[in-house]
Amino acid sequence: MPAVRSKADSTMQINNGAVLVTEWKFAPGDETGWHKHEHDYIVVPLTGGALTLETKDGLISADLLPGRSYARQKGVEHNVINGNDFDISFVEIELL
């Protein structure tokens, strides 16, 4: 049986028809839940650490460095999990 995890906190900051900006905050063990990105997006880490990405191909570790942004194309499907013993946060900018 899969582990039961708490949902990460998300706060929409901007939704203006051009971009959707969401701040994500993960306590230890929090997850986003499985989702598929419908738009290209940029992630701006606010804190450092490693997140675990559950994908259809298995688990992937993603290292976050504060202020070191990265971009992904639409179609990404995953569940993001904070396996650290400290909080992790980032801003996600979806290009609508």
Image (cartoon, rainbow, N blue to C red):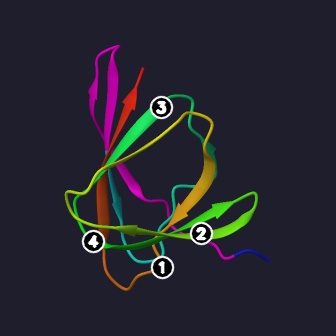
Mark 1 / mark 4, whichever is N-terminal: 4
**Label 1 to label 4: alpha-carbon separation:** 13 Å
Query: Start and end of the magenta stretch?
Result: 3-22
Q: Position of residue 51 (x, y in %)?
A: 46, 70
Disc number placed over residue 60 in the picture, else none:
2
**Label 4 to label 3: alpha-carbon separation:** 23 Å
Residue holding disc 1: 83
Identify the secondary structure beneath mark 3. Answer: strand
Residue holding disc 4: 48
Residue type at tag 3: Asp
- In the displayed structure, 36 sits above or below 15; it is below
Residue holding disc 3: 40
Q: Is residue 91 left or right of residue 77?
A: left
Quadrant for residue 76, please give it: top right
Mark 3 / mark 1, whichever is N-terminal: 3
Mark 1 neighbour class, 10 Å CA radius: few under 14, some 14 to 19, many 20 or more: some
Residue type at tag 1: Gly
Quadrant for residue 36, please give it: top right
Quadrant for residue 45, please give it: bottom left
**Label 3 to label 2: alpha-carbon separation:** 20 Å
Instruction: Count numbered badges in the picture.
Output: 4
**Label 2 to label 1: alpha-carbon separation:** 12 Å
Residue type at tag 2: Ile
Check residue 18 for magenta coloring: yes
Q: List the single residue furthest toward the top.
A: 17
Residue type at tag 4: Gly
Check residue 38 for magenta coloring: no
